[in-house]
Amino acid sequence: MKVLVGVKRVLDYSIKVRPNAAKTAVDLKGAKIMNPFCEIAVEEAIQMKEKKKAKEVIAVSIGDKTAAETIRAALAMGADRGIHVLTNQRIDSDLQPLAVAKIFKHVFEENKTDLVLLGKQSIDDDANQTGQILAAMLDVPQATFASEIEFADDGDLIVTREIDAGLQKVKISVPSVITCDLRLNQPRFAKIPDIIKAKRKKIQTLKLEKLDIDTEPRAKTIKVDNPEVREGGVMVDNVDDLMSKLREDKII
Amino acid sequence: MFASRRALKLVAKKYPSVTTNGKRSISLLVNSNGLNEEQRMIQEAAMSFSETLLMPNAAEWDEKKHFPKDVIKEAADYGFAGIYVKEDVGGVNLGRKEASLIFEALSTGCVGTSAYISIHNMCAWMIDVYGNEDQRQKYLPSMTTFDLFGSYCLTEPNSGSDAIAMKSTAEDKGDYFLLNGEKAFISGAGDSDVFLVMAKTGEKEISCLIVDGDTEGLKFGKNETKMGWNVQPTRAVIFEDCKIPKENLLGSRGQGFKIAMSGLDGGRVNIASCSLGGAAFCLDTATEYIKTRKQFGKPLANFQYLQFKLAQMATDLEASRLMVRNAADMIDQNNEEKTMYCAMAKYFATEKCMDLVDYALQMHGGYGYLREYPIERYYRDLRVHRILEGTSEVMQLITSRNLLKD
């Protein structure tokens, strides 16, 4: 089985995000990391390889030349090779889930893949759409919000999904698309020998402009701004004071 | 900053002072500024190792004087047993800068373990660089997996800083060297397997011998009772008519002192790096402590004296870091003046980091003096860094000698 894993480069979650001066988007200055949900997807793919269920793990990232660093991180974790779809479009806003799904469809078909593992969402735009759109475009089964993936005897996959009502188990055939949730696994840290090995692994670069894919954004961002600052409250001494305050402000 | 951030997240689980959830985004525990992606990943690997395997156990190891050989063996998986040893014998062939990052990260969790690993690396490097092919193939594949532990034997009871005044002799007996003498303060001794021993093979001739742990006539003193570094054994190593085969001569006859000294530039950067990690941990812990501890109705952090002190500690740590990483770079570039820069870095970093830990303990008041709190252990562990691999005084001597030479 050949597994395609999406690895997105995002702004570090420990950075306090700010709107840019023009308030058209988030200011992207600062440290970047691999999207944590993508990291979980990479870990799952590598575990499949260790269990001899997957033959090859291909890490795919879309973005400017720095995206190669994120692919390199996936290679150090254990992915076999990388595909870098090079573009200078902003991957947190300009390049939207529909476009990303189209690009993945292209890569999927070019590489004759059996399974796509994606993060359930990325922590920049939090769209949570790419996996779903991709499955629909490929016309293959999808299992989103996976917290466990098992292999059935007939070669199908049994995926435990985290849904509002609890856990749901679905059995899906391959090829298929699975999006990974937080509790699926604990991603490993790369060891130095693996980091060094990763330097020698191949990353294929594809120029997005040459792929003949319509990546025109369908949603337009009107404005990006800080949330309103919370105003300070007052301390009340007892319940009676609290009640009268609430009545005063016509809350109750 | 893929590397350090995730490591910080891990650390944050146990040490809330290092949280990255926005409440406090600045911590000097890890600095990956200016590092390339690979170096960041290496730093992260070392931080994760430190966090998961060293930090939770270090206090117990210290208390029980336990040498954590099993955990050190695990470090080999991560590539820490042959950091700057070539790849054909199992090393990962990195530079001194990377090694510095690794030892700094490891010593945030356990200074003594990190320091022992650094000594082992120095020994492995000496064999890699000065050894012939047979010696490299015989020792290094096992040293880079920590199947063999290394020890470096230069100091003697009566010759410390004045190493050249050593008394140990290795008499040429035709087929072998007859080794006699005593080495003091040997890290790992009693538990290690390969000893790199400097001894006199002539009146004014020092050579380096590889001595196997099972050599007849090799004896050890008692495990010294020390102030710190309790996680690694320190013993005298005694040689009584040890027959050392000729093929165990490392490098050529008379090259021993040069070999011993060449290992020390890197050794000094490594020890200084161990001070950095310990100090970084203490700075972080103290910062959090003074924010929560209240006296006279307000947090200690609201007292300006402590604010200034904290700023000074942070500045000293960062200055030390820059010097240590710069010295490491100079070894990697084989700069002519590297010895002086390594000496300055070791002098500055080990002194300033010691002061920092002392202040961090002071900020903790009486609690800092208790073993329940980790600071006093770092204090005890860091103190020896001003002494070994060349004392602070010798570091100043090296520096001024270089500055004043004609």
Image (tube, rainbow, N blue to C red):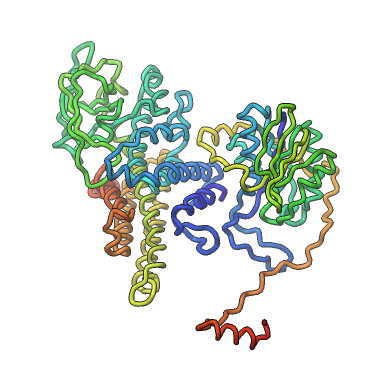
Q: Residue furthest top?
A: B175
A123 and A151: which is toward the camera = A151
Count all numbered tags in the image, as a single digit. 0
- At which x and y percent is residue A222? 78, 67
A216 relative to B153 in the view: left or right: right
- At which x and y percent is residue A215? 83, 50
A57 and A50: which is toward the camera = A50
A29 and B194: which is toward the camera = B194
Tell me which corner region of the image, top left, top right, bottom left or bottom right, holds residue A239.
bottom right
Q: Measuring 39% from the left and 58% from the top, which residue is drawn there?
A: B285
Q: Measuring 66% from the left and 49% from the top, which residue is drawn there?
A: A9
Quadrant of image for the C terminus of chain A: bottom right
A51 relative to A213 in the view: left or right: left
Quadrant of image for the N terminus of chain A: top right
- At which x and y percent is residue A194? 54, 34
Residue B143, relative to residue B270: is it above or below? above
One can see residue B327 in this view: no
Residue B115, relative to residue B73: is it above or below? below
- At which x and y percent is residue B62? 29, 44
Residue B340, relative to residue B304: is it above or below? above
A217 relative to A71 in the view: left or right: right
Q: Measuring 61% from the left and 52% from the top, which residue is drawn there?
A: A32
One can see residue A24 in this view: yes
A122 and A244: which is toward the camera = A244
